[in-house]
Amino acid sequence: MFSGSRAIQHWLTESTRLISHMGSAVEWVTPLGIPIIQDSSLRPNKLKQRNWFPHNFIHSLDSKHTMLTALHCYREGLTFVSVHDRFWTHAADVPIMNQLCREQFACLHSQPSQQDLSRFLVTLFCCSSRPQKLSQHLEDSKHAAGSAQARGLRPGAGEAFHLLLQLTSRRAIV
């Protein structure tokens, strides 16, 4: 039913499994430019790494969407309040806020977030001393994205990320 969402979740989980198998913590830079090290202990917990990363990556996309919406509301002179993924404004301004929210959602999810993440992980974890399986898995995501594009689908499309978010439980970023 939600094959695109499941594929993204599988890719995130498998990437995490391979990275943690190497004894490394998952690291990435959020769309807001904030560097994250998911577990900085000497021996990262593999199960926690695998379970947390898909959720945390999606939450990092949510935080950028919230920030973009807040900035655009500010530019329009709207009062803006947010808790998690709930946005509020004055009742008279709801139509404007809804429009800004949708525009920023579309803008964010038209960017190649999964491909950017893949490039970052390849650069960080796939040097010549790293296992070939991780390098191949991360590189395969580029080919899968190209295949989706050939079928007229946008890789990393907002709908897939939104569905993935709905299917996963909410967790605070670690």
Image (tube, rainbow, N blue to C red):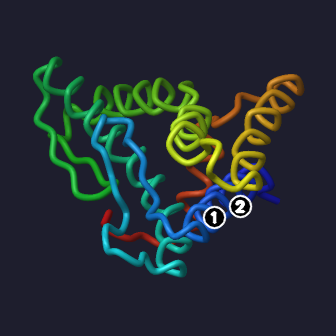
Residue 109, position as x, y percentages in the image: 53, 32
| Disc 2/disc 1 C-alpha distance (Å) | 5 Å
Residue 53, position as x, y percentages in the image: 49, 63
Answer left or right for 58 relative to 119: left
Residue type (three-letter) at the residue carrying disc 2:
His
Residue drawn 53% across the image and 25% down it: 111
Q: Residues within 10 Å of mark 1 (few under 14, many from 20)?
A: some
Camera-side residue of 157 and 118: 118
Split into 4 quadrants, where in the image is the N terminus? Answer: bottom right
Residue drawn 69% across the image and 45% down it: 138
Split into 4 quadrants, where in the image is the C terminus? Answer: bottom left
Answer left or right for 161 relative to 3: left
Outermost residue on the front side: it is: 129
Camera-side residue of 114 and 109: 114
Answer left or right for 165 relative to 160: left
Camera-side residue of 155 and 93: 155
Camera-side residue of 129 and 141: 129
Residue type (three-letter) at the residue carrying disc 1:
Thr
- Residue that numbered label 2 is attached to: 10
Outermost residue on the top side: it is: 75
Q: How many marks?
A: 2
Q: Residues within 10 Å of mark 2 (few under 14, many from 20)?
A: few
Residue drawn 75% across the image and 54% down it: 7
Instruction: Answer whether labels 2 and 1 touch (C-beta < 8 Å).
Output: yes
Residue 49 to residue 30: above or below: below
Q: Which mark is residue 13?
A: 1
Question: Mark 2: which secondary structure?
Answer: helix
Find residue 167 and report its image quarter: bottom right
Question: Mark 1: which secondary structure?
Answer: helix
